[in-house]
Amino acid sequence: MACLGSYPPQAALTAQAQTFLGFDFGTQRVGVASGNRITQSATPLPTVAAQGEARWQAVQALLREWSPDAVVVGLPSHPDGTAHEMTAAARKFARQLHGRFG
């Protein structure tokens, strides 16, 4: 999974960033996982199946619950690295995530 932006911005991430929430955007569902740099592990969390404003409320609840040091959004691409049909949608989701929650 490529890292599409992280919040705080990638330049601000240091060794101090220990916990992460990862999102894999989909038009029907958003996959979620928590990550930990110390244990070098990621754990899947329940998928967000809500749509519209309810989706953002679910994301906000996850951010409040986990209080991650950073957030990453998976950037889908073809095996050769070229853009996938969902690439633009994932980028839009990341921008909206940043706009809503900074």
Image: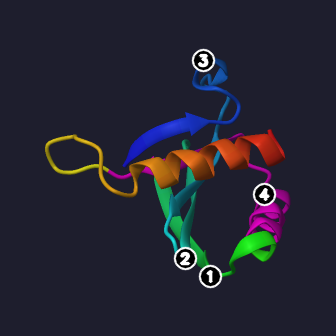
The residue depicted at 69 percent of the width and 80 percent of the height is 50
Indicate the position of residue 17 as horizontal and vertical percent values: 66, 33
Q: Which mark sits nearer the N-terminus, 2 or 1?
A: 2
The residue depicted at 14 percent of the width and 43 percent of the height is 80
Proximity of marks 2 and 3: CB atoms separated by less than 8 Å: no
Question: For the residues marked 1 and 3, what is the alpha-carbon distance in whole angstroms?
Answer: 32 Å
Proximity of marks 2 and 1: CB atoms separated by less than 8 Å: yes
SS for dot 1: loop
SS for dot 2: loop
Instruction: Looking at the picture, tell me which residue is in the foreground, 9 or 43.
Output: 9
Tag shown at residue 11 = 3
Q: Which mark sits nearer the N-terminus, 1 or 3?
A: 3
Residue 44 against residue 36 in the figure, above or below: below
Tag shown at residue 24 = none
User: What residue does disc 2 label?
Assistant: 29
User: Mark 2 or 4, which is nearer the eye?
Assistant: 2
Proximity of marks 1 and 3: CB atoms separated by less than 8 Å: no
User: What residue does disc 4 label?
Assistant: 63
Q: Which mark sits nearer the N-terminus, 1 or 4?
A: 1
Question: For the residues marked 4 and 3, what is the alpha-carbon distance in whole angstroms?
Answer: 21 Å
SS for dot 3: helix
Question: For the residues marked 1 and 4, what is the alpha-carbon distance in whole angstroms?
Answer: 16 Å
User: What residue does disc 1 label?
Assistant: 49
Instruction: Looking at the picture, tell me which residue is in the foreground, 87 or 31.
Output: 87
| Magenta residue span | 55-76
User: Mark 2 or 3, which is nearer the eye?
Assistant: 2
Residue 7 against residue 87 in the figure, above or below: above
Question: Is 57 positioned to the left or the right of 97 in the image?
Answer: right
Q: Amino acid at mark 1?
A: Ala
SS for dot 4: helix
Q: Residue furthest top?
A: 11
Q: Amino acid at mark 4?
A: Leu
